[in-house]
């Protein structure tokens, strides 16, 4: 009998087997999810193939990210999967130019023309199959319906796909605002497309004949369609092979031609005998035995609220609703705080309909005996729920949780809430919520991660948690974000860890993530002595236990841990004196309707994506807006906003008309926001027309996205690629973007550097944007910190480059310095003016401290307007830092912009009417140092430190909660004082 | 017990008195280099101990006491220190720490402060931290980098570079397994015992030693079969420390590769050159320029002698001069690109490719700022100008797994093997009559 060629492709989530005959024809193939049981799944598949394989000589190769371990210990040939793909494509589609292959956790592009070149996603790139799975769970759409749904979309929202966590923070608010699932599904797929095209291609254009491979592209036709559209391909140039999901396995089969053939029995034996590698690092078990677990359960059961039978209760009641990010919680309590009814469930992407149903239930329970006196709403969906159902009070989440926690532990000094996607912790000092910490974008999503992971493994999250309780050797999975954890799990599986140990390990990871990444505590004592934990994730006993072990003390988990927000909202309604509720009546519920549509606000440059919710009777609620203008309210109009003021000043600098020496372009980003007055004066004096790139927009970013080589760099840097593209489009043939490792020495620190990215980004642009070869792209090193040296060198430079007499440049440079110093002084003067104005009128101020380029509305996403809408004025760090003088810090104070931060924070923390909020761009390495130091400065002065992380994400719900919490805490303080 | 003395800046000083009683811990990075440096410091009257523990507790400790978004090397180095201090092995009132400080605009200049914050958090503020730097930052009465000491340190590091270079070459091709490692050990011990006599650190003697070392390694029997040659470049700690790069060198050797790691001393020349280039670019006192130039020249002399010793044997490949390296980056980055590894990193990649090592692992901590530009940012242009270049950038951090890293490196290796096969096919076609042993390509 002839020889057969067998290819086995073991990916992160699936196993694929393909068998070819000697002529290369595909005899059989199969595809199955392996649920981490890689070896067993392969064996089962091969046994099913027994009828055709038995009796043949088999040449076998293994490929795939989970394949190496098996191949190595079974002694079977291994082929790296990109190579397997290339082999298959060369054989079947020899004229292909490029291949896009998406897998469970990998995404790859192969360029075939002009030598094989390939790209794989880095460790922080989640735009893959697993990402779509996660998003489907979030949308509560069965994965097999996802594609159909996406096909019916009307519009696409911008969603970050770099990692699942980011995307969640984009999608969740859209869901809560009532965006259509069809549109969201399509947006998720589109996010994968742009991630692949921009993040992966890294500057190389995808053109010619493109082959699409891998599970996601096979199952989601809409995904392929969006790729075709984005890459502007046609029917001839876009190839979707018939066997795309087993294509790589076929490649492995082709690649096995040179291997020594074995018999069917030998193959089975070899795989069967494959030993898992050494045991993964393990952690102490959660519980030594069943008895210890029982004692634990008993202890926690004691923290409960009285349950009152609604059938017998007569009197007043309060309703609380917590419309959280993924779940909706509702509770009805008696005037003594006893629970009459509670509800906790996933909101399935539509909190409004869930609550409508629940309100019917509540009215049924109440009958004539129970009278609802007041109602309160909290959580992401607070405003929506409030106006939909006439809820009396809206309450910031943090306050709601504090009120609830106090019921269980009056002396509570620390509250930790782990919900579906957020981690919130706050310290209580003097009966006020004091310091608030929320998880940053990169580490969030842990609670729902367990849920998602459990369901991919075929368990409910409760079953999954239970598995881990008595595990003997929990795996150490580290404490990073979910994308990393996925690969840690993969590795643990490869090393033979069972599901129970993975479950327990995940619980430890969630806890470690909170402890070391979010709270950054060295030990349990630094949290507090009386800790209350809550939120849905703590309903999981394994997580709770891991937390107690990690902090080294017992904590209180209220028996109603999942509904604390709702409970607090009800208490809030009661404590703020509600007696007559405006809650929608039972009759009105019958005629209640809710529809929503999307619109783009055109009232200003922010271009907010608005959701217009329309209820019965034409009641309307607009959400998604940063400021009050779409609602027609303008009570906060005209509040001082130095972000906007600075931005307007800089963008209004006019280029010289009819300049003798022609046009010079500069990209408007990064440190140009600081030095523009300098360059503007300099070039104008030299009779150039200085043309700036247009205002940043999402679209501008997208235009340059394909030339970004490093995905983890900050968003302000990434935007530069778009600005350069824009300048090229404007037809400029000279672009000036200088390298500035140093700033002018303001003598506020130990040195006066720029960060490495700001300093050298011009060189990165040069190396990655081919289009610049057609123009003169000038990136001289400019030492503006040494005026004399600069004058000399720059006049030399301009003489060489443009033939300008040296004396002209010398004079222009002198003017430039004067203009720059005037500009800096002007900001300080404006700061003084604003502060005096606010003090005279009693307007509270927020010092919004960041970098010069944070005033770009595309970078700050309108946080400044949001602050105005909350009734506060915005002042900048560079308008006040000089008031503090040199500030002593515990780090090397060597970056100018950061020195300003420290000094501004030091000064502002001594001003009772100024609160401090720091803006931090995601990926800013320097801020790993500055944020801790800022916290020390601000908290050291007894003030509240608030940090807002910003990225390409443009949704402000979380920011709003933080700012409201801050203002609520400030009010609490003032009341006390 | 020594009195705790604080400087004007509030920093705990390492006093002369402490020099007598204290044990100073230094972190592990380059085993050979650092063991020689340790010996040298002992000669100068310091009681120094080299930390070599690399178990999982190191990173666990690091994660606890350092901001988790800071570079991975900081987490490892600080983790290693605090873990050692917590081990109970050292008297906390008689222990100090050595840490290097480069003083550039990169985050690394702040490690020392993060270490102090960590010590504070763990209640060990009485442990003095000594900055080792060439920029005159943070002086301590009890520790002085004198010119003679600096010169000797330079010699020791060149020894280390030489041994590393020869060992990597020989280990890949040795006929008798283990012979190279034995010789490395032998020389390491010999050099350590020699250091105790200052006469042995005169330059004339060092120079002779270069030749002796090269001669000894030249006696190792090699079988120069074609092998995939892989260069390792990147952020300095991750590039060299096995703890940082998940034992990258071992992994590549297990994949049957010859590993080439550019030496440490170019980094020192680079740092000296930064001062020189800054003065050229922005102006400044002539004296600063001259002092830097002196140091660069001295390093150049030693490197030239080391190269001569190596190039006496055809089976070895001598590294290029620093000035050659500097020449290579023209058209890529400017000499003002100095933070972190700056232009040196770009230069090392190009040098490797020119020296027939087109396969490169560019290592960096996750989110490394300078490498956004000088590493990852330059790969595209390097590939464009050098079509054979086969570079993979790998990020390292506490959460990245070996599986993912190795899968990406394997992809690079598959490419390399394919390239090698093609080249050999071409070769065998073009010179069928020649029967010489194939030289390594």
Image: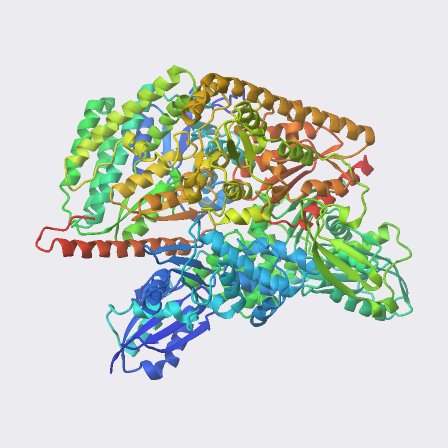
Determine if residue A290 is in view.
Answer: no
Q: Is residue A315 left or right of residue B210?
A: right
Q: Nearer the viewer, residue B185 or A378?
A: A378
Determine if residue A922 is in view.
Answer: yes
Q: Quadrant of the C terminus of chain A?
A: top right
| Residue depicted at x 39% and y 69% | A247
Across the whole image, how many numbered discs are drawn on residues? Answer: 0
Locate residue A890, reporting x and y percent.
56, 29
B153 versus B81 height, above or below: above
Locate residue A175, reporting x and y percent.
67, 60
Locate residue A186, reporting x and y percent.
59, 63
Locate residue B181, reporting x and y percent.
23, 44
Residue most extreme to the bottom: A51
Q: Nearer the viewer, residue B303 or B198?
A: B303
Q: Is residue A882 left or right of residue A34?
A: right
Q: Nearer the viewer, residue A259 or B195?
A: A259
User: What's the image's color scheme?
Assistant: rainbow
Q: Nearer the viewer, residue A60 or A848?
A: A848
Q: Quadrant of the N terminus of chain A?
A: bottom left
A334 versus A712 height, above or below: below
Q: Is residue B135 left or right of residue A226?
A: left
């Amino acid at each position: 009998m002839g020889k057969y060629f067998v290819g086995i492709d073991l990916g992160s989530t699936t196993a694929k087997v393909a068998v070819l005959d000697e002529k290369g024809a595909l005899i059989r193939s199969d595809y199955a999810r392996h649920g981490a049981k890689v070896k067993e799944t392969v064996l089962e598949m091969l046994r099913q193939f027994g009828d055709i394989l038995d009796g043949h000589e088999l040449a076998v190769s293994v490929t795939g990210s989970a394949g190496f371990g098996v191949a190595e210990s079974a002694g079977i040939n291994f082929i790296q999967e990109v190579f397997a793909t290339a082999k298959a494509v060369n054989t079947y589609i020899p004229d292909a130019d490029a291949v896009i292959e998406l897998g469970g956790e990998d995404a790859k592009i192969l360029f075939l023309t002009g030598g094989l070149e390939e790209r794989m996603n880095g460790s922080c790139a989640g735009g893959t199959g697993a990402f779509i799975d996660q998003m489907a769970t979030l949308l509560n759409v069965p994965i097999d319906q996802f594609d159909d749904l996406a096909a019916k979309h009307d519009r696409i929202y911008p969603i970050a796909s770099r990692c699942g966590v980011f995307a969640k923070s984009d999608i969740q608010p859209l869901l809560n605002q009532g965006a259509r699932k069809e549109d969201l599904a399509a947006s998720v797929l589109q996010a994968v497309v742009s991630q692949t095209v921009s993040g992966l291609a890294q500057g190389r254009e995808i053109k010619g004949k493109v082959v699409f491979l891998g599970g996601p592209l096979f199952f989601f036709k809409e995904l392929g369609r969006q790729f075709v559209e984005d890459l502007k391909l046609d029917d001839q140039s876009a190839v979707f092979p018939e066997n795309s999901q087993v294509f790589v396995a076929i490649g492995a089969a082709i690649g096995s031609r040179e291997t020594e053939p074995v018999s069917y029995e030998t193959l089975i034996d070899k795989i069967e005998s494959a030993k898992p590698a050494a045991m993964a690092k393990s952690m102490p078990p959660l519980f030594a035995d069943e008895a210890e677990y029982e004692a634990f359960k008993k202890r926690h059961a004691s923290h409960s609220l009285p349950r009152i039978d609604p059938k017998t209760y007569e009197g007043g009641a309060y309703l609380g609703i917590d419309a959280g990010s993924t779940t909706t919680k509702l509770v009805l309590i008696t005037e003594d705080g006893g629970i009459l009814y509670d509800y906790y469930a996933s909101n399935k992407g539509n909190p409004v309909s869930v609550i409508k149903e629940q309100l019917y239930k509540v009215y049924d329970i109440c009958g004539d005996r129970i009278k609802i006196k007041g109602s309160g709403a909290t959580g992401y969906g607070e405003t929506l729920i409030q106006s939909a159902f006439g809820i009396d009070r809206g309450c910031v989440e943090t306050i709601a949780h504090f009120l609830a926690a106090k019921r269980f532990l009056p002396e509570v000094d620390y509250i930790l809430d782990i919900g579906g996607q957020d981690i919130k912790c706050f310290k209580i000092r003097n009966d006020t919520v004091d310091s608030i910490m929320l998880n940053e974008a990169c580490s969030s999503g842990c609670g729902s991660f367990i849920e998602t992971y459990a369901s991919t493994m075929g368990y409910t999250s409760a079953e999954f948690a239970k598995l881990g309780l008595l595990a003997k050797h929990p795996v150490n999975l580290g404490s990073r974000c979910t994308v990393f954890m996925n690969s840690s799990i993969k590795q643990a599986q490869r090393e033979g860890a069972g599901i129970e140990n993975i479950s327990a390990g995940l619980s430890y990871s969630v806890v470690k993530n909170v402890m070391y990444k979010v709270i950054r505590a060295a030990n349990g004592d630094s949290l507090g002595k009386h800790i209350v934990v809550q939120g849905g994730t703590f309903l999981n006993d394994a997580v709770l236990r891991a937390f107690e072990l990690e902090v080294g003390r017992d904590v209180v988990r209220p028996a109603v841990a999942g509904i604390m927000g709702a409970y607090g909202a009800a208490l809030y309604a009661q404590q703020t004196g509600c007696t007559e509720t405006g809650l929608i009546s039972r009759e009105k519920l019958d005629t209640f309707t809710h529809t929503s549509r999307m619109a783009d606000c055109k009232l200003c440059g922010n271009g907010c994506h608005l959701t217009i919710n329309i209820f019965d009777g034409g009641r309307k609620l607009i959400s998604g807006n940063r400021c009050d203008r779409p609602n027609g309210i303008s009570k906060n109009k005209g509040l001082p906003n130095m972000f906007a003021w600075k931005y307007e000043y800089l963008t209004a600098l006019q280029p010289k008309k009819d300049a003798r020496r022609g046009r010079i372009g500069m990209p408007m980003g990064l440190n140009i926001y600081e030095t523009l007055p300098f360059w503007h004066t300099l070039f104008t004096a030299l009779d150039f027309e200085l043309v700036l790139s247009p205002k940043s927009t999402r679209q501008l970013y997208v235009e340059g996205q394909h030339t970004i080589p490093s995905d983890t760099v900050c968003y302000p840097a990434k935007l530069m690629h778009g600005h350069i593209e824009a300048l090229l489009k404007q037809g400029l043939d000279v672009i000036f973007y200088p390298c500035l490792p140093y700033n002018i020495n303001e003598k506020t620190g130990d040195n006066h550097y720029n960060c490495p990215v700001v300093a050298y980004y011009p060189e990165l642009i040069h190396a990655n944007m081919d289009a610049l070869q057609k123009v003169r792209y000038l990136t001289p090193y400019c030492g503006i910190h040494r005026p004399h040296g600069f004058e000399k060198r720059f006049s030399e430079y301009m003489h060489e480059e443009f033939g300008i007499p040296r004396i002209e440049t010398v004079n222009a440079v002198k003017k430039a310095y004067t203009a720059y110093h005037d500009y800096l002084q002007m900001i300080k003067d404006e700061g003084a003016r604003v502060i005096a104005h606010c003090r005279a009128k009693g307007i509270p101020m927020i010092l919004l401290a960041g970098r010069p380029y944070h005033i770009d509305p595309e970078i700050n996403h309108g946080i400044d307007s949001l602050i105005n809408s909350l009734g506060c004025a915005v002042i900048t760090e560079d308008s006040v830092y000089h008031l503090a003088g040199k500030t002593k810090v515990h780090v090397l104070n060597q970056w100018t912009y950061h020195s300003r931060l420290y000094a501004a924070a030091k000064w502002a923390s001594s001003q009772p009417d100024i609160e401090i909020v720091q803006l931090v761009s995601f990926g800013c390495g320097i801020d790993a140092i500055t944020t801790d130091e800022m916290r020390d400065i601000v908290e050291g002065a007894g003030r509240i430190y608030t940090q807002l992380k910003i990225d390409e994400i443009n949704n402000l719900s979380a920011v709003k909660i933080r700012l409201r919490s801050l203002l609520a805490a400030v009010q609490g303080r003032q009341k006390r004082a | 017990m020594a009195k705790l003395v604080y400087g004007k800046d509030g920093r705990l000083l390492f006093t002369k008195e402490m020099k007598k009683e204290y044990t100073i811990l230094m972190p592990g990075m380059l085993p050979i280099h650092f063991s020689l440096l340790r010996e040298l410091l002992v000669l100068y009257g310091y009681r120094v101990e080299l930390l070599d523990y690399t178990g999982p507790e190191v990173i666990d400790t690091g994660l606890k006491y350092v901001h988790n978004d800071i570079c991975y090397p900081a987490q490892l180095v600080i983790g290693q220190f605090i873990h050692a201090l917590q081990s109970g092995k050292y008297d906390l009132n008689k222990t100090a720490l050595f840490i290097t400080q480069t003083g550039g605009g990169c985050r690394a200049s702040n490690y020392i402060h993060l270490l102090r914050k960590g010590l504070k958090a763990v209640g060990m503020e009485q442990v003095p931290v000594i900055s080792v730097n060439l920029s005159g930052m943070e002086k301590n009465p009890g520790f002085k980098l004198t010119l003679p000491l600096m010169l000797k340190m330079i010699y020791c590091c060149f020894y280390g570079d030489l041994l590393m270079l020869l060992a990597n070459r020989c280990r890949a091709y040795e006929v008798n397994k283990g012979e190279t490692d034995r010789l490395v050990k032998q020389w390491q011990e010999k050099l350590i015992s020699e250091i105790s006599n200052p006469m042995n650190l005169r330059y004339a003697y060092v120079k002779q030693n270069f030749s002796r070392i090269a001669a000894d390694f030249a006696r190792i029997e090699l079988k120069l079969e074609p092998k995939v040659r892989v260069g390792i470049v990147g952020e300095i700690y991750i590039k060299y420390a096995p703890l940082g790069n998940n034992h990258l060198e071992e992994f590549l050797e297990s994949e049957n590769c010859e590993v080439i790691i550019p030496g440490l001393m170019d980094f020192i020349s680079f740092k000296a050159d930064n001062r020189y280039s800054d003065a050229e670019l922005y102006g400044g006192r002539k004296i600063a320029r001259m002092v830097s130039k002196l140091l660069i020249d001295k390093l150049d002399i030693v490197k030239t002698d080391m190269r001569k010793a190596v190039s006496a044997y055809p089976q070895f490949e001598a590294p290029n001069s620093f000035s050659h390296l500097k020449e290579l980056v023209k058209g890529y980055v400017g000499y003002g690109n100095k933070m972190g590894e700056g232009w040196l990193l770009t230069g090392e990649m190009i040098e490797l490719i020119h020296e027939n090592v087109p396969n490169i692992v560019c290592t960096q901590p996750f989110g490394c700022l300078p490498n956004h530009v000088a590493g990852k940012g330059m790969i595209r242009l390097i590939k464009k100008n050098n079509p054979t270049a086969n570079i993979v950038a790998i990020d390292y951090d506490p959460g990245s797994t070996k599986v993912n890293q190795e899968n990406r490196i394997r992809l690079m290796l598959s490419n390399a093997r394919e390239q090698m096969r093609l080249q050999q096919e071409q070769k065998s076609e073009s010179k069928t009559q020649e029967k010489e042993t194939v030289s390594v390509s």
